[in-house]
Image (cartoon, rainbow, N blue to C red):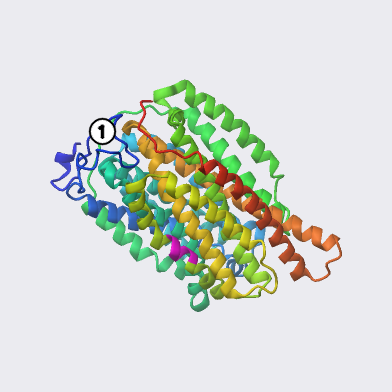
Amino acid sequence: MTSTAQGTDAPAAPPTPSASTSAAGPTADNGAAEAAHLPPGAARLIALLVGSAFVVILNETVMGVALRPLMDEFEVSASAGQWLTTGFLLTMAVVIPTTGWLMARLSVRTLFVIAMSAFTLGTLLAALAPVFGVLVLARVVQAVGTALMMPLLMTTIMTIVPPAKRGQMMGVVSIVISVAPAVGPTISGVILDQLSWRWMFWLVLPIAVLSLVLGSLWVRNVSEPRPAHLDPFSVLLSVLAFGGLIWGLSLIGEAAGEHDPLVTPWIPVTIGAVALAVFIWRQLTLKGQALLDLRAFGSGSFALAVLLVSASMMALFGTLILLPLYLQDVLDLSTLQTGLLMLPGGLAMGLLAPVVGMLFDKVGPRPLVAPGALVVAIGLFLMTGLDAGSGRGEIVVYHVILHIGLAFIFTPLMTSALGSLPPHLYSHGSAIISTAQQVAGAIGTALFITLMTRGTTAAIEDGQADPVLAFADGVHTAFIWGSGISVVAVVIALFVRQPKPVEL
């Protein structure tokens, strides 16, 4: 159905950007030519999508602080408990590559209803879970909705928002991508301090139901669904590739800890890497009928942006897993105290994201990304000085500095990445970015945990008898390596340029 048939408030897609008009930022004469206002109904649609996406993405990191009480209640090991997060990430990694095909075949309204229905059902199932296996299944169902929502949000914005306002709108999207995972531990810490873990789901359920109802009433189609080829072999390869990599990387972090994983981590990693190579070959062979159209990487701006976004997600998720461990195991803080100390960083990123988006619309990506990468490197370098005697105020300052830098990276990179693509690749580009973020998050988590554990072991072998001080040495080691990697990102950021849409 077309927009007219769907309803009078359906936003119309803007004119396709020409080669002379930058879809990723201003040029000398495009300010007057571009529409200054959103199409009718677009603001309400985007607000609903952003709010829904924030709620579903929040659940990606909300379980970390809750792991200990869940292990106690269901009497499961840490290895089994990690499947609440691993199963979520695996499902995300498997579903996201299919979203390009789904968005071509289905209307925005249909896909939104499917996403929020899955998330709502998973949330209800989790709140009622009588045994641990049901809770893991509930997380998988939740992840299906989460995986669909982010590509849907980004593609819709690229379709209905005029190029001159995309930076500002993508700044709002950055709040979802970066702040929701950052505040997840804070929210779960506050809930667990006062209520049962089930309230993490009961409190979210009415919000999910409200989003589903409003979406059924308000969301209208913004593009014409079209026939699209589905290659079953590509789907199988994507499951093996991204599922294997995410699972294997999660196992590496687990193997570095106190508990041995069920299988050797390198088995799923190797299977995932081989399947990924075959998947890439298959997509390039299929060209226009690919499950995940890799022609998007033909844009140098897109490829560079994906690389830097992935590096930033490694830093974000590595810090999200490492800092709570440091606060609880070295400084002996409670889950509530840990969550509150990590809150200012997430809030700083959220407040800055729309501002950065507006700046992007005026100056483009390079003046923002390079300084942002430098600030991230400074934040990680300062964290290398954390030890058993560090003060809480010092930790908050370092954490805020890191998130300020990330705020100046995510919005410009995502906007310029998708803005450098032709409209028919928007859905595939957003799926590629979302998939890369999941894999990068798993890499960051595995890398930081492994380095921390090895640093702790080395300290003990060198004669450090106090386990708390040895753990602090391990945290120091992980942040040193993270700081070094961030310096490489600074160098890469210097090559960011104002992109122009290319024909692919």
Residue at the limit of the structure toward the front, as seen here: 28
Q: Which residues are magenta?
A: 345-349
The answer to whether 1 is drawn above or below residue 129 in the figure is above
Direction from residue 272 to residue 288 in the image, left or right:
left
**Residue 99 visible in the displayed image:** no
Q: Quadrant of the C terminus?
A: top left
Q: Which residue is at the front of the view, 163 or 240?
A: 163
Disc 1 marks a residue whose amino acid type is: Thr
Q: Residues within 10 Å of mark 1 (few under 14, many from 20)?
A: some
Image quadrant assignment for residue 330: bottom right
Q: Position of residue 124 (x, y in %)?
A: 41, 61
Q: Residue at x 40, y 25 (%)?
A: 289
| Front-lying residue, 202 or 422 | 422
Q: Residue at x 31, y 53 (%)?
A: 49
Relative to 118, is 47 on the left or the right? left
User: Which is the main secondary structure of the residues drawn in magenta?
Assistant: helix
Residue 265 in view of the camera: yes
> Residue 341 appears at what percent x and percent y?
53, 71
Residue 103 pos. (x, y %): 34, 38
Magenta-span inclusion, residue 399 = no
Q: Tell which of 96 and 172 is nearer to you.
A: 172
The residue beneath circle 1 is: 16
Which image quadrant: the N terminus? top left
